[in-house]
Amino acid sequence: MRKLAQLSTVTDTQTITVKLYKDSEYNEYVCRLYYNNVERTDASYHTDCKQDATDTMQTMLEFAVI
């Protein structure tokens, strides 16, 4: 998998990051959520649409900060 993009924000207690990957084997985009550089394996999103994945990255980051 190849990383295409990354969004991050820092709160008082942690760094929250969403990374976007392209999985060529399955021809899909994968968004993954990280807290302090530790992946939340229960919080990933898979899609075949790059725009959907990009929009989801922003939404995941917004909800993670709440």
Image (cartoon, grey):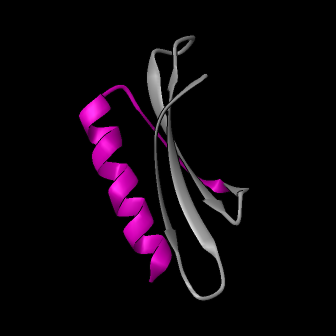
Quadrant in which the C terminus is drawn: bottom left
51 vs 18, left or right, is left
Q: Position of residue 1 (x, y in %)?
A: 61, 22
Q: Residue at x 42, y 61 (%)?
A: 60
Q: Is residue 29 magenta?
A: no
Total of numbered circles in the picture?
0
Q: Residue at x 34, y 57 (%)?
A: 58
Extreme residue in the bottom direction? 12
Q: Residue at x 65, y 77 (%)?
A: 14
Residue 24 to residue 8: above or below = above
Q: Nearer the viewer, residue 6 or 47?
A: 6
Q: Position of residue 11 (x, y in %)?
A: 54, 82
Extreme residue in the right direction? 38
Q: Is residue 45 magenta?
A: yes
Magenta highlight: main SS = helix
Q: Quadrant of residue 52?
A: top left
Q: Nearer the viewer, residue 28 or 57?
A: 57
Q: Quadrant of residue 39?
A: bottom right
8 vs 37, left or right, is left
Q: Residue at x 47, y 78 (%)?
A: 65
Q: Quadrant of residue 54?
A: top left
25 vs 47, left or right, is right
Q: Position of residue 61 (x, y in %)?
A: 43, 64
Residue 7 to residue 31: above or below = below
Q: Position of residue 20 (x, y in %)?
A: 48, 39
57 vs 2, left or right, is left
Over which residues does the magenta segment extend? 41-66
